[in-house]
Amino acid sequence: METHEMDVLSDSKQEILGNRTGIMTNPELSIEMIEGAKQTVPSSQGDATEMAAVKAEYIEEAVPIGSSPVMVEVSENGESVGQFDGLAVLLDKLGERLAFERQGTRLYEAFLQKCESLTLEDASGPSVEELRHICEEELEHFHLLQNAITALGGDATVQTPSADVAGVLSHGVMQVVSDPRTTIPQTLQAMLTAELVDNDGWQMLQDLAAELGQDDLEEQCRKAYEEEQEHLEKVRDWLTSMTMDEASGSTEGLDAEIDASEEEEDIRSAKASTRSRKSKSSGSSKSKSKKKKKR
Ligand SMILES: [Fe+2]
Ligand SMILES: [Fe+2]
């Protein structure tokens, strides 16, 4: 093995062996570090007030993130009677859910791959079949939204402003799920974040469809929302069970260690008392023999 490879292995082993991120790892060096930081001169002029002023300029001058799809309301004789703002809002939010369901499908695909690769047998965690079922429902929801946008006269390939924001928001979740180092509970924590947002999103979409008199869409959203509630419950249950199992497992381990050390202590005491009895008895027999000799 190359020296460099060995160094990397030894470094990663070191990382696994102990968490050295806390300041109390070395209190003496920590004091030196704090002293050093106090003596360090800031590399630029100004303070937080000036930074806030610069940020304020950017906020004032910023242009919006994209623009909503414009829906023009047309009269019976085909003349334009103005913009239909309600529908534009609905299309924006449909675009948001579409982006989220696309990402949701990819999240579950990545989660599935992790579970299949690890081949873990944990009764309290998700099975591959259960994850595949949820993944399929996410994809169904994506197609539902595609069709709904088209039926309303919109373009499902448009990235709406809310879709753009939703895409940025879910980046962190995808990073956690696709990271090979994250455990199943850590991945479930990320999925819980996604499912909580998704549940609220579908509820809002159902309410919005109802508000705008889109009865068919409201019904479709209601069904999707019910399925999303099941996803949320399952993810929450798996995460809770696995976390509790981990906690109770470590407690059992600790109990076992305590039991073992108590057992060892008992054995040591028993051996010591046996030795003591033997030495006393041999001591007395020796003295007896000496006494005998004396006689
Ligand atoms: Fe979803
Ligand atoms: Fe979901």
Image: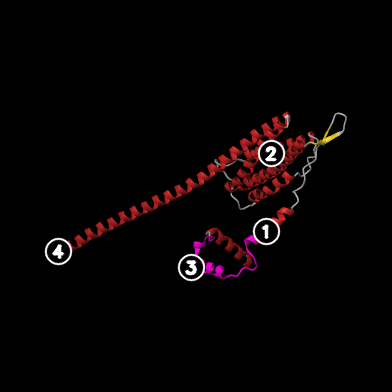
Q: Are marks 1 and 3 in contact (CB under 8 Å)?
A: no
Q: Residue 74 location, x and y as percent?
A: 84, 33
Question: Badge 1: how crowded within 10 Å, few (<14), some, or many (20+)?
Answer: few
What residue is disc 2 on? 138
Magenta range: 20-49
**Residue occupying the point 57% across, 46% down:** 185
What residue is disc 4 on? 291
Cβ of disc 3 within 8 Å of ligand 2? Answer: no
**Residue occupying the point 65% across, 38% down:** 134
Kind of residue at badge 1: Ala
Q: Residue 146 location, x and y as percent?
A: 76, 37
In the image: residue 66, left or right of residue 276: right
Kind of residue at badge 4: Lys
Q: Who is closer to the viewer here, 81 or 25?
A: 81
In the image: residue 281, left or right of residue 22: left
In the image: residue 292, left or right of residue 271: left
Cβ of disc 2 within 8 Å of ligand 1? Answer: yes
Label 3: state its secondary structure.
Answer: helix
Q: Is residue 119 visible?
A: no
Along the polypeptide, which appears first: circle 1 or circle 3?
A: 3
Q: Main secondary structure of the magenta part?
A: helix
Q: Is 88 in the magenta?
A: no
Q: Is 44 in the magenta?
A: yes
Q: Nearer the viewer, mark 4 or mark 2?
A: 2
Query: Label 1 to label 3, Cα distance in Å?
Result: 39 Å
Q: Quadrant of the N terminus?
A: bottom right
